[in-house]
Image: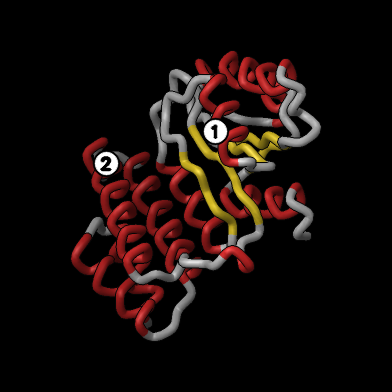
Amino acid sequence: MDLPERLVKAMGDLDEDQVLELAGSMLASGAEPLEIIELCREGFKIVGDRYERREYFLSGLIISDDIFGNVMGLLDRSQCFKLDDSQKLGKVVLGAPLGDVHDIGKEIVSMLLRCSGFEVVDLGVNVRPSEFLEGAVDSGAGVVGISALITMAYEPLRETVAAFEREGLRQRVKIMLGGGAVSQRVCDYAGADAWSRDASDAVKFTRQFSGKE
């Protein structure tokens, strides 16, 4: 079993020490951060499948989130995302909307965007429409990404888009949605520009919106 396969298995087994050791070894051998993140995502799928089969419980999901957070910390400390201004493709504001406190999907999108050369302004979770607006104005970001995993977020999503419209910023700022509670129907309801099925989609749309595709 090679390093990538071992990393996926370790993530699925919730073996934090092994995950960090293997991720560090891959990084030292020249692997791209994006590859390591994608392998962790494969491991997440194993965790999710085991949760659905009741082999893991809620604590297993929490542990997997913690492990992934530590992998991201490892990648951060490696300086692999440090870009000078000439290398940056643009700024993106990310957050989970008011009422939603889930952040693992957003964290994956953030990491992939940074791997791709974007500067990310992460507002966190439970973000009010006015805070998304303020974040975009203050940073000058041309793209706002909102991750929603609960249906209670539908109205805050719509209110966030409306806030940008009221300020006359909808032509300058593109808004994309993502997360398990989002679909084309939700995107249309909120008035957003696009919705992503996964983190790779989010990067693709961001590149398109930023004129980098």
* Residue 97 seen in render: yes
Q: Pick whichever, 46 or 177, lies toward us.
A: 177
Residue depicted at 47% across the width and 50% down the height: 108
Residue 135: assigned label: 1
Q: Pick whichever, 113 or 163, lies toward us.
A: 163
From the viewer's perspective, tell me whether residue 39 is left or right of residue 191: left
| Quarter of the image that includes the C terminus | bottom right
The answer to which image quadrant residue 100 occupies is top left
Q: Secondary structure at mark 2?
A: helix
* Residue 180 seen in render: no
How are the colours assigned in the image? secondary structure
From what the image shows, is residue 134 above or below residue 211? above
Q: Give the label, 1 or 2, closer to the camera.
A: 1
| Quarter of the image that includes the N terminus | bottom left
User: To which residue does mark 2 refer?
Assistant: 62
From the viewer's perspective, tell me whether residue 47 is left or right of residue 17: right
Q: Pick whichever, 31 or 19, lies toward us.
A: 31
Pointers 1 and 2 in contact (C-beta within 8 Å): no
Residue depicted at 61% across the width and 62% down the height: 88
Task: Count neighbours of disc 1 (C-alpha within 10 A) and say few if under 14, some if 14 to 19, many if 20 or more.
Answer: many
Which x, y percent locates residue 84? 54, 67
Q: Secondary structure at mark 1?
A: helix
Residue depicted at 57% across the width and 50% down the height: 199
Residue type (three-letter) at the residue carrying disc 2: Ile
Which x, y percent locates residue 162? 69, 17
**Disc 1/disc 2 C-alpha distance (Å):** 29 Å
Which x, y percent locates residue 120? 52, 49
Residue depicted at 61% across the width and 54% down the height: 200
Which x, y percent locates residue 9? 32, 66
Residue type (three-letter) at the residue carrying disc 1: Gly
From the viewer's perspective, tell me whether residue 132 is left or right of residue 24: right
Task: Count neighbours of disc 2 (C-alpha within 10 A) and say few if under 14, some if 14 to 19, many if 20 or more.
Answer: few
